[in-house]
Amino acid sequence: MRLPAVVLAFMLVAGPVAAEELSGTLQKVKETRKITLGYQEASVPFSYLDGNQRPVGFALDVCLRIVDAVKQQLGMPDISVDFLPVTSSNRIPLMVNGTIDLHCSATTNNADRQKQVAFTNTHFLSATRFAAKKAGNINTIDDLKGASVTAVAGSVNLAQLIKVNAERKLGVKILPATDQAEAFLMLETDRAQAYALDDVQLAVAIARSKEPALYMISAETFSKPEPFGIMLRREDAPFKALADRATAELYGSPEIEVMYKRWLESPTPPNGINYNVPISPALRHAFSNPSSSFDPDVYDVAK
């Protein structure tokens, strides 16, 4: 009878110790019995509101897999999930001050942001490309020689267009637009022969246009792929390790293909629009080799 008594005594001591070892987000979730997901209301198709004003999207589905892993690790299947709308300007402050625990959208993982927050494994790669009308027979960047090309004023896309134009001596007439709506209108009305923007945003704009079949998106890019990641707090190693494990398991399973196709290659709620964005070779490589690096070279399939 003495051995079981010793084991029981150890268990009674070990239980509180294990609980005390929790820190950061995991400790916060255990104490509050809830986890808060930040999302953006119009970051289609990564996070947005459906016809019933419910937050949905590809990045939110990835976040919910992380939530499942949290429930399992804490042994708390009844943890509640709160959804909080955030904006591009307040998402990082709300993460840093503990208001949200995960940010689930299309946030670019870069060196500057990693000084304030952390990211889990990359769930999407976006690069600057151009859209043009198929009838214009403009297929490559060199085909833009002498053409009128628009991009949003102050954007990274415009800076990249200017750089490539100078490097290749294309003689492009650059037409800065005030916003994405004006830029696409320029393309639609033939004031511009091409429109430079992040490829996934071009796909969304074309899918929502009056005649999507009129347009194409270039295979050639103005930039290296930029990673999108689920955002979490810095210096919270246990929670990041859990999120990295959960996403790596998801990206290494057949489920990621189903999830991706649901949001980027199928009719999506609320209007049944298909954005027709297939998994790129670089993203497929990223899913096979999960990484939370901000370095675009990490995702270069040619290396």
Image: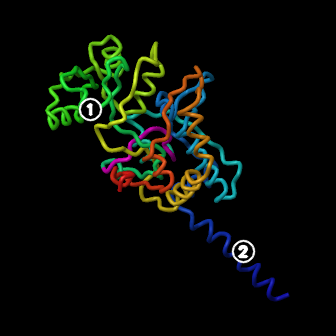
Q: Which quarter of the image is occupied by the C terminus?
A: bottom left
Residue 43 relative to residue 175: left or right = right
Question: Is residue 23 highlighted in magenta?
Answer: no
Of helix, strand and loop, which mostly describes the magenta segment?
loop
Q: Position of residue 199 (x, y in %)?
A: 39, 33
Label 1: which secondary element? helix
In the displayed structure, would residue 270 be above or below residue 243?
above
**Residue at 17%, 29% in the rendered image:** 170
Q: Quadrant of residue 58?
A: top right
What residue is shown with label 1?
Answer: 141
Q: Name the foreground residue: 191 vs 90.
A: 191
**Residue at 71%, 51% in the rendered image:** 77
How many neighbours does mark 1 have within 10 angstroms: few (below 14), some (14-19), or many (20 or more)?
many
Q: For the view shown, which residue lies furthest in the bottom direction?
A: 2
What residue is shown with label 2?
Answer: 12
Q: Position of residue 190 (x, y in %)?
A: 30, 12
What amino acid type should be assigned to the residue bearing mark 1? Answer: Ile
Label 2: which secondary element? helix
Q: Which residues are magenta?
A: 101-111
Q: Position of residue 21 (x, y in %)?
A: 57, 67
Q: For the view shown, which residue lies furthest in the right direction?
A: 1
Q: Nearer the viewer, mark 2 or mark 1?
A: 1
**Residue at 47%, 52% in the rendered image:** 121
Residue 246 relative to residue 162: left or right = right
Question: Is residue 108 highlighted in magenta?
Answer: yes
What amino acid type should be assigned to the residue bearing mark 2? Answer: Leu
How many neighbours does mark 2 have within 10 angstroms: few (below 14), some (14-19), or many (20 or more)?
few
In the displayed structure, would residue 82 be above or below residue 192?
below
Q: Which quarter of the image is occupied by the N terminus?
A: bottom right
Please report whichever mark, 2 or 1, sits nearer to the chain's N-terminal start.
Answer: 2
